[in-house]
Image (spheres, rainbow, N blue to C red):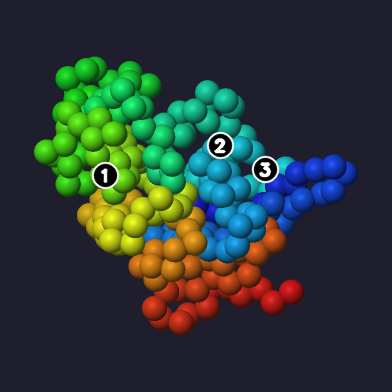
């Protein structure tokens, strides 16, 4: 599904060169749940943004299916983000004046889906995350965990192949965070979706199929979770 080859992203700040990604290479198989872990500033979110088509590499390739993201034009990238990728953010990014149903409908509006079908698909997505009784509730009427479930419903409403989650439990208490982890695992198993999660949360990492540890823009460890199988390890 995803192949990343010698990916570099370099920023310059006050004359200093910062390598957010420094020759990153790895593959992701269909249906994997991968946790990317590492300290702040290690390149985790940068890597996620590149896979999501939110930014472009300075050097290297990211291939998703048969698409080389570096060769896609702006309209093609927008279509890729809307149809192939579902995004989940730490800050929720819900529209405060919209109901849960209306928030989940938004990606479908951009896809040109008719209103009746939008509503049915949004209701189904909210049902999958256990919020079928909260369709008309606005974000301020929902708990943090429920708001994140709305975000997950919004992420899956277009039936994406890949879900990218950036610190999805970062604003939640431990109990709500556990429920979100279990929900992501359930979506992976029931929908066959590939999930890549950037996290500081060890609970997520231990629920993943595989853990990538990143440091200073490099993948330093790639481990099959629970099996002790090191797929790739860098010691330099």
Q: Nearer the viewer, mark 3 or mark 1?
A: 1
The percent position of residue 20, horizontal first and vertical second, equals 69, 52
Disc 3 residue crowd, few under 14, some 14–19, many 20+, Cα 10 Å: many
Quadrant placement of the C terminus:
bottom right
The percent position of residue 150, horizontal first and vertical second, equals 28, 39
The percent position of residue 103, horizontal first and vertical second, equals 30, 29
Residue 162 in sight here: no
Side of 5 where 128 appears, left or right: left
The percent position of residue 27, horizontal first and vertical second, equals 52, 59
Residue drawn at (34%, 57%), measured in percent from left and top?
A: 173
**CB under 8 Å between discs 3 and 1:** no
Viewer-closest of 108 and 93: 93
> Is residue 94 placed above or below 52 in the rendered structure?
above
Which mark is drawn over residue 54? Answer: 2
Residue drawn at (39%, 64%), measured in percent from left and top?
A: 204
Disc 2 residue crowd, few under 14, some 14–19, many 20+, Cα 10 Å: few
Disc 1 residue crowd, few under 14, some 14–19, many 20+, Cα 10 Å: few
Which residue is tagged 3?
Answer: 57
Side of 188 where 206 appears, left or right: right
**Spatial distance from mark 2 to mark 3, Cα to Cα?**
10 Å
Figure quadrant of residue 110:
top left
Disc tally is: 3
Which residue is tagged 1?
Answer: 143
């Amino acid at each position: 599904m995803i192949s990343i080859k010698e990916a570099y992203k370099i920023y310059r700040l006050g004359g200093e060169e910062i390598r957010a990604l420094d020759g990153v290479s790895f593959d992701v198989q269909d249906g994997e749940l991968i946790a990317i872990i590492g300290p702040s500033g290690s390149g985790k979110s940068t890597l996620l943004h590149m896979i999501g088509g939110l930014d472009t590499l300075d050097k290297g390739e990211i291939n998703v299916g048969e698409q080389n993201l570096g060769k896609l034009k702006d309209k093609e990238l927008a279509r890729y983000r809307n149809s192939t990728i579902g995004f989940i953010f730490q800050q929720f990014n819900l529209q405060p004046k919209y109901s849960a149903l209306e928030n989940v409908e938004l990606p479908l509006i951009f896809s040109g889906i008719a209103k009746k079908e939008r509503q049915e698909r949004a209701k189904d997505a909210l049902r999958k995350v256990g919020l079928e009784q909260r369709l008309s509730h606005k974000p301020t009427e929902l708990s943090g965990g429920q708001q994140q479930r709305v975000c997950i419903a919004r992420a899956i409403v277009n039936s994406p192949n890949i879900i990218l989650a950036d610190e999805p439990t970062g604003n939640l208490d431990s109990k709500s965070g556990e429920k979100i982890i279990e929900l992501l695992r359930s979506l992976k198993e029931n929908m066959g979706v590939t999930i890549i999660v950037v996290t500081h949360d060890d609970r997520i990492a231990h629920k993943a199929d595989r853990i990538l540890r990143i440091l200073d823009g490099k993948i330093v460890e790639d481990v099959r979770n629970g099996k002790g199988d090191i797929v790739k390890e860098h010691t330099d």
